[in-house]
Image (cartoon, rainbow, N blue to C red):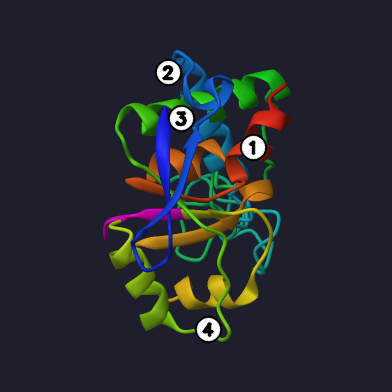
Amino acid sequence: MELEVLKIDGSASGKKVVLPENVFGVTPNDHVIYLDVVQYLANQRHGNAKTKDRSEVAYSTKKLGRQKGGGGARHGSLKANIFVGGGRVFGPVPRFYHTKLNKKVKSLARVSALSYKAQDNAITLVEPFTMEAPKTKEFIQILNNIKAGDRKVLVVLPENSDNIFLSARNLDWANVITVDEINTYAIMNANSLVLVDGVQDILAERVK
């Protein structure tokens, strides 16, 4: 697939790039995409939810009434779960949600997601650029110039740029990451990709 590299004003730079087939031209594997996305979302969970059971609530352990003859059920203390303020039965406890996925599976998932974007013609290449200061309006203007769309745009940089990142931070429909941070979920969650020229070569080198 051949794409024109655009300038940030939207004009053609005169350079054309052929996207690497091993990254943007593979046959997508839906199942590995599913596995990678599920793992990514699971790894975002903190697993800190916790409730107190009857051994942890602060109540007296004094027996409420005699064992027999009271006309009702037997109760040992107010810590029982049937009383207001008592301990909770089978409540959540801290747990570790992280799962493991093989590197080759994750790599196949990423290139499958990128290949889907290439098939949908949802990839835009732009010349390397910098911003002198964080300017959200200026960043929006750049995306408008290159016609990247205004629905979930993922901008991938070859290296970190604080000013570009800060310019997009307040936009809930735009996400800026470096090529080191690219993942299957971010790719699939975006409607269009904006790749700074050079990113495609780094991705191609890493899947070898």
Q: Position of residue 171 (x, y in %)?
A: 38, 71
| Residues at marks 3 and 4, CA–CA distance in whole angstroms | 30 Å
In primary-sequence order, the first of circles 2 and 3 is 2
The reply, left or right, for residue 207 in relation to residue 74 is right
Q: Is label 4 or label 1 in front?
A: 1
Mark closer to the chain start, 4 or 2: 2
Q: State the residue at coordinates (37%, 68%).
A: 9
Q: Residue 188: x, y in percent?
A: 41, 38
Name which residue type carries label 3.
Ala
**The C terminus lies in quadrant:** top right
- Please provide percent x and percent y for residue 192: 35, 47
Q: Quadrant of residue 95?
A: top right
Q: Is residue 144 in view from this perspective?
A: yes
- In depth, the one of 31 and 206 nearer the eye is 206
Q: Badge 3 is on which residue?
A: 113
- For the residues labelled 4 and 2, the Cα–Cα distance comes to 38 Å
Identify the magenta region: 148-154
Label disc, if present, on residue 134 of the rendered structure: 4
Cα separation, mark 2 vs mark 1, equals 24 Å
* Residue corresponding to mark 1: 201
Residue mark closest to the camera, 4 vs 2: 4
Q: Write down the residue under mark 2.
A: 30
**Residue 7 spot, x, y in % from top left:** 43, 61
Mark 2 Cα shell of 10 Å, populated few (<14), some (14-19), many (≥20): few
Secondary structure of residue under mark 3: helix
Q: Amino acid at mark 2?
A: Asp
Residue 93 is at least partly visible in this image: no
The residue at the point 53 percent across, 42 percent down is 41
Q: Amino acid at mark 4?
A: Pro
